[in-house]
Amino acid sequence: MLHPSLLPLLLKKVAAVVWGGNSWSSAVIMARTGFCDSKPLLDLHKKAEERRPALRAWANSSEPKDRRHPPEGEEPRRGQKVEPECKWERRLPVSIKEGNITGYYESDLTAWVGLSYELLYHQGLESLLRREVEKAMEKLDLTWDRACAWDMFEHMMKNQYRNAFASAELPRPFTDTTRAVLVDWLIQVHEMLHFQDETLYLAISLMNRGLRQIKVSTVNLQLLGVVCLFLAAKKEECLVPEVSELCYLMDNGYTKKQLLRMERRVLSGLQFDLSHCSPLDFLLFTASIARCSAKVVWMARYLLELSLLEGECVVYLPMQLAGAVLCLARRVLQEPPTPDGDAAWCIASIIYIGSETTLLRIMHILAGAAAKAHGQENRGTFVKYSSALTMHVSSHPVLQNVSCLLPAYLKWPESLVVLASHEKIAEAWVPQRLDEDLKL
Amino acid sequence: MAQGASFPYEEVAEIGGGAYGTVYKARDTESGKFVALKSVRVQTDQDGLPISTVREVALLKRLEQFDHPNVVRLMDVCAIQRTDSETKVTLVFEHVDQDLKTYLEKAPAPGLSQDRIKDLMRQLLCGLGFLHSNRVMHRDLKPENVLVTSGGQVKLADFGLARIYSCHMALTPVVVTLWYRPPEVLLGSSYATPVDIWSTGCIFAEMFRRKPLFCGESEMDQLGKIFQVIGLPSEEEWPKDVTITRKQFLPPNHPPITNFVPELSEQGAELLLEMLTFDPLQRISALNALEHEYLKEEETADTEGSTREGDAIP
């Protein structure tokens, strides 16, 4: 369908559409970190003429013979605004705005891509990305109407910033170890109660917020965890366990009254805000666009669930976690590449936000977590993902030492340069970034 | 009212015995700003707060993330236990002094200008479209809960509350006004988001008339008044699952809608009739109404129109 050498260019162009400029660095990052591995970075040697038609052709899915002339009604018009219908004031940068296009023109990329076709590319590629996003949103039931899909996607992208914490630090006396013990226990309880995965991610997210917003003593830590799972179930599940059942699961260490009091405290403390931007949604969404194999998806889901146990991971955006687990899963499984698969993978990488450093750091954390889980068979997640249903992903031998497959992320000084430009991209989504990278 | 350090609001005045309980104007003791407090007492059995309350309040909180300009801000939620079996959930909303009812009453003699009405309608429909696309229906839209700030901004209030309350307060003997209710609700048929469009249509007419369009005294009377204006629907249109039959109403020969809303332009009348369509499935949606010619019309053109009409009225 698309010539492989065009992938990097395509990537660059769409990134420009989405983020308005500065796409150069993102293309480099995606390539480096395996988001578009096995492909040449940027094909600078081809003439612009050769690149344009195929790109356009793919973007609009038109026949090769139509290449030279855009179909009627699609004449590139300078200054034409492609704005999705506005329901109210649009504040997100995803849609093409004048400012973005101008910003893009000013970048040095204009030097090697003909100006006259710029807007046409923008339109074609935006519609391509849009179509993919809409399809995936619909497939995953993240939207109830295709017309709203793009809006929902924009909201998801923007909203995920509410989910990451500025710091991984826990209030005393809690440590990452105590937290991990609690999360592991909750994962097992969750499994026992046959809840959906969504409920688990919500519960852990509520617990992370609860730990920081409500004063709890060590004695009540388990109670907090259970209440978060209870509330997540009330929000997501059809069948909610009885309070007495939950108390029983805690060896009746707490009374029902204590549990209900904690429920009120958590609800008030969290202001009844039980919304959550699940990294699992981002994972399935990205995997759907990237046409990942079932095994890659299961592997990524396993790694994503391991991230719940890692206290450090709370600072990352759901999209970053999803991107990292998919990259790592591909590394581990080493499936033979296909041109279509690579094209889809590149399209999916467009929606990734963040720097290469972040991506690699998460991959390293999870590689460590996966190796650790291998040694401790009592870990809930490991056991859960060793079943036939999940294609035995957790017992994959490579996971025992997957870190060696990854480049050491601190070796690249230029990553800091890349970081600077990525901060800008991130700001485009939301002004207050919570990126740890600056603390490196 | 149980108040503690965790409840930093002091009541200033009662601002209304709403259908679902008393609403208080209160002061935020920290910021000094005024807020509106709406409380609901929910039965808490052995399984804690009911699932429906948790979900509905969480939904209202989620809507907050969008920060929609035409929807009243929910600033805070508190859950306070009163007894073993009852918890009071207090929703703290931003306080807006004026509702559309007083706004219409206060409007000087000839009434609102065409421009102003269009602007209010656009804002109202915009807020409603937002709620509907998030699967929230208002169910009790009326001029009293369409707030208008001093800057002329429309903010919808009390949406989504209907469901929070109705689950737990079904037995409260409340008097809810019938005037803005659509036929499907009056007939006891099933209903969804189109109910709000009907109410919006009634409000639209009221902006011109400065008095309600249908002032029924009972459900049958309300239906009769509606059919006098929109005509009696055909036998095919009449819902199958209701006890009230079509024969109970006289087939009146109904005059054109402009008899009831005289200042309405042709396009305005068209929009109004699309909102007051008997069949909820045929009724225009909020987002489509926003696209209607009447509301899309250029400001300048209708400014002249309204001055002329304004002049015509003594």
Image: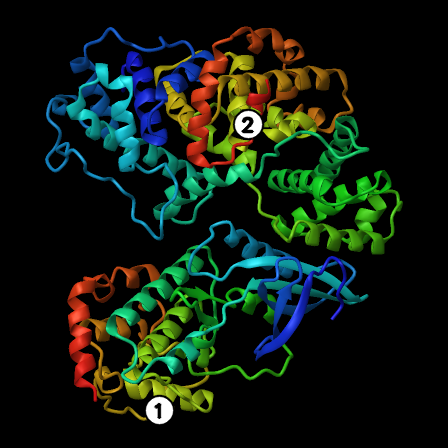
Q: Tell me: A306 left or right of A23.
A: right
Is disc 2 placed on a helix, strand or loop? loop
**Residue A136 occupies quadrant:** top left
Whether residue A290 is visible, yes or no, is: no
Amino acid marked by disc 1: Phe
Percent from the top left, x then y, of residue A436?
58, 25
List the residue tagged with mark 2: A435
**Residue B298 occupies quadrant:** bottom left
List the residue tagged with mark 1: B249
| Disc nearest the viewer among 1 and 2 | 2
In this rendering, the answer to whether B160 lies above or below A56 is below
The residue carrying pointer 1 sits among few (fewer than 14), some (14 to 19) or many (20 or more) residues within 10 Å by Cα, namely some
Percent from the top left, x then y, of residue B83?
80, 68
Quarter of the picture containing the C terminus of chain A is top right
Is disc 1 placed on a helix, strand or loop? loop
Q: Chain of mark 1?
A: B
Q: Nearer the viewer, residue A191 or B118?
A: B118
What is the C-alpha distance between the residues marked 1 and 2?
Answer: 67 Å
- Whether discs 1 and 2 lie on one chain: the answer is no
Quarter of the picture containing the N terminus of chain A is top left
